[in-house]
Amino acid sequence: MTDHKTGIIVHGVGGLYRIRMEDGSTVTCKAKGVFRHEGMTPLAGDRVRIESGTGEDECRIAEILPRKNALIRPAMANLGVMFVVCAAKDPDPSLRFLDKMLCILEYQEIEPVLIVTKADLDSHRAEQLRTKYEQCGFTVFVTDSETKGEDSAIAAYLRRFDNSVIAAFCGASGTGKSTLLNRLFPALSLETGTLSEKIARGKHTTRAVSLFPLSEISDDSCHGYLADTPGFSMLDFERFDFFSLEDLPYTFREFIPYIGRCRYTKCTHTKEEGCAICEAVSEKKIPKSRHTSYLELYEALKEKKAWE
Ligand SMILES: Nc1nc2c(ncn2[C@@H]2O[C@H](COP(=O)(O)OP(=O)(O)OP(=O)(O)O)[C@@H](O)[C@H]2O)c(=O)[nH]1
Ligand SMILES: [Mg+2]
Ligand SMILES: [Zn+2]
């Protein structure tokens, strides 16, 4: 048995995983039964060790190397950058949904980058989103398939990646993730679809996470991996794993400079007198909608804590 081959899971469906090996070759295999017993599921982005037997069938994932992070939705591991895709219209943006995703990414130490798509449908709202999230300290790109907006700036951002970075595009279904990826990397020719096509199919257009080595889909100045993911619906999102109430304020990056400056050391930043965060909201230094999202997440986490 040779047991020293490692690679990265680029696709996994129905317990069958496609792995890109260090030498650039690809193998498809199952995972050893031991993972099922341990309740561990190999994820796209996982670095794994392969054990290969004599026949092709005997190749198995023997070990999942330590993860940097893992997300449930999209089901991925070892992400460095997540492009959160939000449409200016069709579907209408949900700030609660967006902020929750941003919190989870901050908590997992994945750099969130916001991409506002479909600016052709509502350029005013697209720019409002840009202003709001740039004020909070996020990198924001605005684009659309008509004008190609900041496509080249997104491509330039991707070009800064080193070999080890895994990045993905996530967001609600129909926001235009696959459309944008196809524009940036025509070699991908990903499936895209209109809302009515999706309803007719009863499914999202993109059905599983797929990781692409940037060196293969673009010129060799790009490195790392890029993933397209199936869009999530609101319902999926409710089931998202979450963190503790104490961690919540730290997942809002624009709150951080104010933490510790409130009158009461146990300030929950919800409505207390002398709360430095609430004050920053009233002075418009923090967008009100961000604080509203904070309050909603705070309530949800408080309830969860009460159940535990
Ligand atoms: N007007 C306009 N339509 C767009 C734009 N980008 C994408 N679309 C349309 O939006 C629909 C959904 O696009 P997709 O790229 O399939 O969306 P997705 O985010 O990959 O969706 P899932 O795979 O289901 O998660 C398609 O009909 C696209 O043609 C845009 O910038 N402007
Ligand atoms: Mg898609
Ligand atoms: Zn406070």
Image (cartoon, helix red, strand yellow):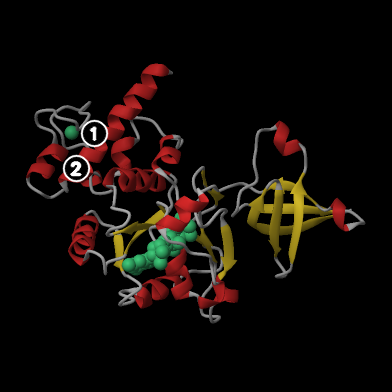
Residue sitting farthest toward the top: 307
In-front residue for pair 172/98: 172
Q: Earlier in the sequence, mark 2 or mark 1?
A: 2
Task: Report x, y in % for residue 255.
Answer: 23, 44
Looking at the image, which residue is at 82% across and 53% down?
A: 59
Q: Is residue 158 above or below residue 76?
A: below
Q: Is residue 223 above or below residue 39?
A: below
**Residue 75 as seen in the image, left or right of residue 4:** left
Q: Which residue type carries mark 2? A: Tyr
Judged from the image, the secondary structure of the residue bearing numbered disc 2 is helix
In-front residue for pair 24/217: 217
Task: Say which quarter of the image contains residue 147.
Answer: bottom left
Q: Is the residue marked 2 within 8 Å of ligand 3, measured from its CB?
A: yes
Looking at the image, which residue is at 49% across and 45% down?
A: 73
Q: Which residue is mark 2?
A: 258
Looking at the image, which residue is at 27% across and 47% down?
A: 95
- Mark 2 and mark 1 in contact? Answer it, CB < 8 Å: no
Task: Say which quarter of the image contains residue 39.
Answer: top right
Q: Which residue type carries mark 1? A: Leu
Structural crowding at the residue carrying mark 2, measured as other residues with C-alpha within 10 Å and reported as few (<14), some (14–19) or many (≥20): some
Q: Which residue is mark 1?
A: 295
